[in-house]
Image: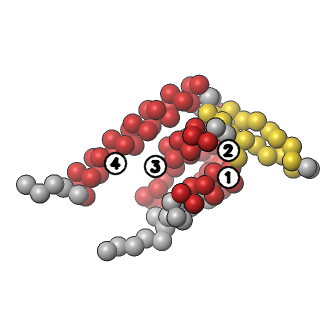
Amino acid sequence: MYICDMYSKELTKGTLQPIILKLINEKGRMYGYEITQEVKTMTSGKIDISEGALYPILHKLEAKKVLETEKVFIGKRVRKYYKVTKEGKKMVETVTEEINDFIETLNLIFNPKPI
Protein backbone atom coordinates (compact mmCIF):
# COMPACT_ATOMS: atom_id res chain seq x y z
CA MET A 1 0.00 0.00 0.00
CA TYR A 2 1.30 3.43 -0.98
CA ILE A 3 1.20 6.01 1.80
CA CYS A 4 1.69 9.64 0.85
CA ASP A 5 2.72 12.38 3.25
CA MET A 6 1.83 15.09 0.79
CA TYR A 7 0.74 15.14 -2.85
CA SER A 8 3.07 16.61 -5.46
CA LYS A 9 2.56 20.12 -6.81
CA GLU A 10 2.09 18.63 -10.28
CA LEU A 11 -0.81 16.50 -9.05
CA THR A 12 -2.60 19.23 -7.05
CA LYS A 13 -1.99 22.22 -9.33
CA GLY A 14 -5.18 21.87 -11.37
CA THR A 15 -7.36 21.29 -8.32
CA LEU A 16 -6.34 24.24 -6.16
CA GLN A 17 -8.79 26.72 -7.66
CA PRO A 18 -11.82 24.41 -7.26
CA ILE A 19 -10.71 23.51 -3.72
CA ILE A 20 -10.37 27.17 -2.73
CA LEU A 21 -13.69 28.17 -4.32
CA LYS A 22 -15.61 25.28 -2.76
CA LEU A 23 -14.16 25.95 0.68
CA ILE A 24 -14.85 29.70 0.68
CA ASN A 25 -18.36 29.05 -0.63
CA GLU A 26 -19.09 26.58 2.17
CA LYS A 27 -17.58 28.71 4.95
CA GLY A 28 -19.12 32.00 3.79
CA ARG A 29 -15.93 34.02 3.96
CA MET A 30 -12.30 33.25 4.73
CA TYR A 31 -8.91 34.92 4.82
CA GLY A 32 -5.79 33.52 3.17
CA TYR A 33 -4.03 31.86 6.10
CA GLU A 34 -7.34 30.39 7.26
CA ILE A 35 -7.81 28.79 3.82
CA THR A 36 -4.38 27.16 3.89
CA GLN A 37 -4.89 25.82 7.40
CA GLU A 38 -8.39 24.51 6.72
CA VAL A 39 -7.23 22.62 3.62
CA LYS A 40 -4.27 21.19 5.53
CA THR A 41 -6.55 20.09 8.40
CA MET A 42 -9.25 18.62 6.15
CA THR A 43 -6.70 16.60 4.17
CA SER A 44 -4.58 15.55 7.17
CA GLY A 45 -1.68 17.51 5.70
CA LYS A 46 -1.77 15.80 2.29
CA ILE A 47 -2.61 19.07 0.53
CA ASP A 48 -0.53 22.01 1.69
CA ILE A 49 -1.26 25.22 -0.21
CA SER A 50 1.63 27.65 -0.10
CA GLU A 51 1.06 31.40 -0.02
CA GLY A 52 2.87 31.54 -3.36
CA ALA A 53 0.18 29.32 -4.88
CA LEU A 54 -2.81 30.69 -2.94
CA TYR A 55 -2.65 34.44 -3.47
CA PRO A 56 -2.28 34.45 -7.27
CA ILE A 57 -5.40 32.25 -7.44
CA LEU A 58 -7.33 34.53 -5.04
CA HIS A 59 -6.29 37.65 -6.99
CA LYS A 60 -7.23 36.04 -10.31
CA LEU A 61 -10.67 35.05 -8.98
CA GLU A 62 -11.17 38.52 -7.55
CA ALA A 63 -10.27 40.10 -10.92
CA LYS A 64 -12.83 37.81 -12.60
CA LYS A 65 -15.49 39.00 -10.10
CA VAL A 66 -15.84 35.46 -8.74
CA LEU A 67 -14.64 36.60 -5.32
CA GLU A 68 -15.10 39.87 -3.49
CA THR A 69 -13.07 41.10 -0.58
CA GLU A 70 -13.75 42.74 2.74
CA LYS A 71 -11.00 44.36 4.81
CA VAL A 72 -11.30 43.99 8.57
CA PHE A 73 -9.03 45.91 10.94
CA ILE A 74 -7.71 43.78 13.79
CA GLY A 75 -5.69 46.08 16.00
CA LYS A 76 -3.08 47.62 13.72
CA ARG A 77 -3.38 44.85 11.16
CA VAL A 78 -5.72 44.52 8.21
CA ARG A 79 -7.17 41.10 7.40
CA LYS A 80 -8.59 40.60 3.91
CA TYR A 81 -11.57 38.23 3.79
CA TYR A 82 -12.70 36.61 0.56
CA LYS A 83 -16.32 35.81 -0.23
CA VAL A 84 -17.90 34.14 -3.27
CA THR A 85 -20.05 36.47 -5.39
CA LYS A 86 -23.34 35.51 -7.07
CA GLU A 87 -21.42 34.87 -10.30
CA GLY A 88 -18.90 32.89 -8.28
CA LYS A 89 -21.60 30.60 -6.89
CA LYS A 90 -22.39 29.53 -10.46
CA MET A 91 -18.71 28.84 -11.02
CA VAL A 92 -18.57 26.77 -7.80
CA GLU A 93 -21.39 24.57 -9.14
CA THR A 94 -19.66 24.19 -12.50
CA VAL A 95 -16.21 23.35 -11.12
CA THR A 96 -17.71 20.97 -8.54
CA GLU A 97 -19.53 19.06 -11.29
CA GLU A 98 -16.42 19.08 -13.46
CA ILE A 99 -14.08 17.83 -10.73
CA ASN A 100 -16.53 15.11 -9.65
CA ASP A 101 -16.81 13.95 -13.26
CA PHE A 102 -13.01 14.03 -13.56
CA ILE A 103 -12.68 11.87 -10.42
CA GLU A 104 -15.13 9.36 -11.90
CA THR A 105 -13.10 9.31 -15.12
CA LEU A 106 -9.86 8.75 -13.21
CA ASN A 107 -11.54 5.86 -11.40
CA LEU A 108 -12.24 4.24 -14.79
CA ILE A 109 -8.51 4.27 -15.44
CA PHE A 110 -7.04 3.57 -12.01
CA ASN A 111 -9.78 1.35 -10.54
CA PRO A 112 -11.29 -0.49 -13.51
CA LYS A 113 -14.11 -2.89 -12.81
CA PRO A 114 -13.24 -6.51 -13.54
CA ILE A 115 -14.82 -7.89 -16.69
Q: Secondary structure at mark 2?
A: strand
Residue 68 placed where, x, y %?
Answer: 68, 32
Question: Mark 1 belongs to which amino acid?
Answer: Glu
Q: Is residue 52 visible?
A: no
> Pointer 3 and pointer 1: residues touching (CB < 8 Å)?
no
Q: Which residue does the numbered mark 3 point to in the structure image?
A: 14
> Pointer 2 and pointer 1: residues touching (CB < 8 Å)?
yes
Tell me the distance, in whole angstroms, between the alpha carbons under discs 2 and 1: 6 Å
Q: Which mark is residue 76?
A: none
Q: From this viewpoint, which residue is outermost toward the left?
A: 115
Question: Mark 3 belongs to which amino acid?
Answer: Gly
Q: Which residue does the numbered mark 2 point to in the structure image?
A: 30
Residue 71 placed where, x, y %?
Answer: 80, 39
- Label 3: few (<14), some or many (≥20) within 10 Å? few
Residue at (51% x, 60% y) in the render: 43
Q: Which residue does the numbered mark 4 point to in the structure image?
A: 103
Residue at (35% x, 73% y) in the render: 2
Residue at (34% x, 45% y) in the render: 102
Question: Mark 4 belongs to which amino acid?
Answer: Ile
